[in-house]
Image (spheres, rainbow, N blue to C red):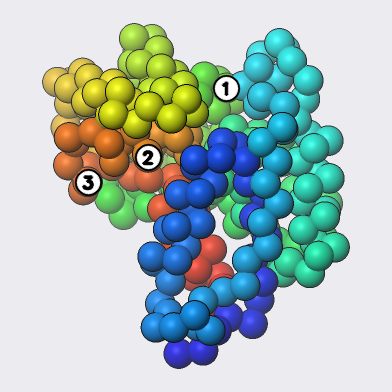
Amino acid sequence: MRSPDKILGVYGGMGPAASAEFLRLLTAMAPARKDQEHPIVYVYSNSQTPDRTAAFFGRGESPAGALREGLDKLCEWGADLLAVPCNTAHIFIDKFRSELKKPLIHIVEATIDDAVKASPDGCWIIATGATLASGIYTAEAKRRGYTLFDVDEAVRDLATEAIRLVKAGDLPASGKVMDEIGMRLWGIRRAPIVTACTELPLAYDASSLPPEMGVSSLKSLSRACLEALYR
């Protein structure tokens, strides 16, 4: 085992708890036995990035400028690979992804990879309203011939509440909301739940739902980053 030659640049802060969990997962999942075998990670954490969902629905400033500035800064610092632990941010990043100076490990592509492995016949998906409305996940699933099951408005509202509670630091309450989501969805179809907002894996972990029935976008991004770094 040796440390990776490449440096990972992470644009975080969307939200802070999700970014902190992403960094924890990078450490926990890395095939390292000592400090020096872990990757070098540069973190640019900007919790002041304009709200992605509000911007998508025309209710606030676009985060595109802040995202581009932060990702360019990470490249200037010397990052060889880029990662953004926020699903909704990728709606805006995709518009300039091809112009980035370094490769981006895309959270949607990584998460669909894991969803296919977890349940070839399809998965439920919960996310922000913007992520769902944008079609960023359904487009990638369709490209691969994969099925993501739509959730109803009541479950979408519950997911929004779970996200809000995680951002507010109330994980126990977010876990209870996630329990309600699981009960509603599995009453229709027993399929894994893709948590396609990076707050939602924290809510899922705080719930009583079985770990093997969740597909965490945070874990998927961590896995994909580590695979690229230790390649």
Give the mark nearest the N terminus, 3 or 2.
2
Q: Residues within 10 Å of mark 3 (few under 14, many from 20)?
A: few
Relative placement, left or right, of 19 versus 179 is right
Q: Give me the C-alpha separation between circle 3 and circle 2.
A: 10 Å
Q: Which residue is mark 2?
A: 201
Q: Which residue is mark 3?
A: 211
Return the x and y of residue 220 as percentages of the image width and height: 43, 53
In the image, residue 174 sits, relative to residue 44, either above or below, namely: above
What residue do we see at 34% from left, 9% from top? 154
Q: Quadrant of residue 203?
A: top left
Q: Tag 3, which secondary structure?
A: helix
Q: Quadrant of the N terminus?
A: bottom left
Q: Amino acid at mark 3?
A: Pro
Q: Amino acid at mark 2?
A: Pro
Q: Which residue is mark 1?
A: 130
In the image, residue 100 sits, relative to residue 129, either above or below, namely: below
What residue do we see at 67% from left, 46% from top? 45
Q: How many marks?
A: 3
What residue do we see at 70% from left, 41% from top? 46
Relative placement, left or right, of 50 versus 201 is right
